[in-house]
């Protein structure tokens, strides 16, 4: 077996130790004689596992009382629908920083009025708007942000706060750095970048906020159902939740979120420094003050060179460097499980490729 250096944007690299642990106990989950994908979600063994995932996450993020941890299916895209179904009554305010916030805003329009509190769309989503450009209208139910813009490679460096509830899609930088849960009313993250396989979304929701939710909805669309039924109203994404638990324990064994944040910075700095010292051969998409530590996006002098870059890199075992189909260019995703060694290999490859061209 030869494992590659995986720079995929999601699904993406998972910690090797976690994959091995999952493999080792796949046929016999905690001496039940069954796989985790074979046991009942109503069993004590399942419940103990899910309780541990929630408790570990709470400990990790110091989640205050008054917030519930829930697990949902349907990916980030289902949250584009659900947040508005539950909370859009008058107006939803969006800080539009990329394809995913744009999509969330468009999905919300099914339920009511939306507007942009701020936007970097006119400038190709190259930056995170600064607070002095925010304009929150009267009657706003919530402000919605995307912490990390997977496609354009920008990331909030510090989070804003508002007088109205703040919602955040953290799908592509969840658990890559510490954050203060109490600054938000609802946070969600599709697992398939930093925390697990596709198929589970982790939500952290303020119970006070739920009092404002619409009740004229099908039960499956109500956040309240997931809170009341401890995410087991129907069959939860059992394997995904189990896997998230493994990743959480891996994170804990590797020094927790503060250690992860400094490692992620070190990794991203390695790659950005190649961009910055390339005399314009590599042109970063994001403005420097908005750079993502998760997704480094850049262009080469021509689309032909970009294709050659990705192909030559793949030959060397550096996989997933082609940019998203909507904007082209190149992208290196450096999620938690991508190693410093992998980033060094990428930086070395980029340096050599530039010299050869
Ligand atoms: N939000 C962000 C930040 C994303 O990067 C993505 C997908 N890459 C989504 C939402 C949509 O997630 P899904 O494909 O799970 O619907």
Image (tube, grey):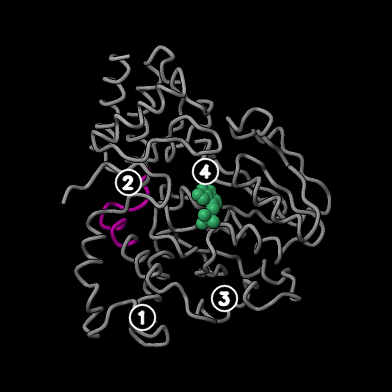
Residue underneath mark 1: 48
Label 1 and label 3: CA atoms lie apart by 17 Å
Where's residue 280, x and y in %?
Answer: 44, 14
Q: Nearer the viewer, mark 2 or mark 4?
A: 4
- Ranked by sequence position, the earlier of labels 2 and 3 is 3
Q: Say above or below: 69 vs 313.
A: below
Q: How crowded is mark 4: few (under 14 residues within 10 Å), some or many (20 or more)?
A: many
Q: Quadrant of residue 195?
A: bottom left
Q: Could you tell me if residue 181 is visible in this image?
A: no
Task: Examine the structure image and report whether residue 7 is included in the region drawn in magenta.
Answer: no
Q: Could you tell me if residue 215 is visible in this image?
A: yes
Tell me: is circle 4 under 8 Å from ligand 1: yes
Give me the residue at 81% from left, 46% from top. 137
SS state under label 1: helix
Residue underneath mark 2: 259
Q: Is most of the magenta stretch helix, strand or loop?
A: helix
Where's residue 242, x and y in %?
Answer: 35, 70
Instruction: Indicate left or right for 87 with 240 as reference.
Output: right
- Ranked by sequence position, the earlier of labels 1 and 4 is 1
């Amino acid at each position: 077996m030869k494992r590659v250096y995986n720079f995929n944007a999601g699904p993406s690299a998972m910690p090797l130790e976690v994959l091995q642990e999952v493999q080792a106990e796949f046929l016999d989950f905690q001496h039940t004689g069954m796989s985790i994908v074979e046991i009942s979600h109503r069993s004590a063994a399942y419940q103990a596992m899910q309780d541990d995932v929630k408790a570990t996450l709470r400990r990790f993020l110091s989640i205050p009382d008054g917030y519930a941890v829930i697990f949902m299916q349907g990916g980030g895209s289902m949250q584009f629908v659900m947040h508005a179904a539950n909370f859009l009554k008058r107006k939803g305010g969006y800080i539009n920083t990329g394809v995913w916030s744009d999509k969330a805003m468009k999905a919300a329009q099914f339920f009511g009025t939306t507007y942009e509190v701020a936007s970097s769309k006119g400038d190709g989503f190259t930056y995170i708007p600064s607070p002095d450009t925010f304009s929150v209208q009267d009657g706003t139910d919530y402000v919605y942000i995307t912490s990390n813009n997977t496609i354009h490679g920008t990331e909030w460096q510090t989070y804003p706060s508002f007088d109205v509830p703040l919602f955040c899609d953290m799908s592509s930088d969840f658990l890559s750095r510490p954050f203060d849960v109490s600054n938000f009313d609802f946070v969600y993250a599709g697992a398939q970048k930093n925390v697990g396989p596709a198929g589970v979304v982790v939500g952290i929701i303020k119970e006070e906020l739920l009092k404002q939710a619409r009740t004229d909805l099908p039960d499956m669309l109500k956040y309240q159902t997931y809170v009341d039924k401890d995410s087991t109203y129907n069959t939860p994404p059992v394997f995904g939740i189990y896997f998230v638990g493994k990743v959480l324990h891996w994170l804990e064994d590797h020094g927790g979120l503060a250690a992860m944040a400094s490692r992620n910075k070190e990794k991203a700095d390695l790659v950005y420094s190649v961009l910055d010292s390339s005399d314009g051969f590599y042109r970063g998409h994001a403005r420097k003050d908005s750079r993502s530590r998760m997704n480094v996006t850049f262009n080469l002098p021509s689309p032909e060179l970009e294709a050659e870059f990705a192909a030559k890199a793949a030959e060397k075992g550096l996989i997933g460097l082609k940019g998203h189909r909507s904007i082209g260019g190149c992208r290196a995703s450096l999620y938690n499980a991508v190693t410093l060694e992998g980033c060094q290999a990428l930086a070395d490859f980029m340096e050599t490729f530039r010299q050869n061209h």
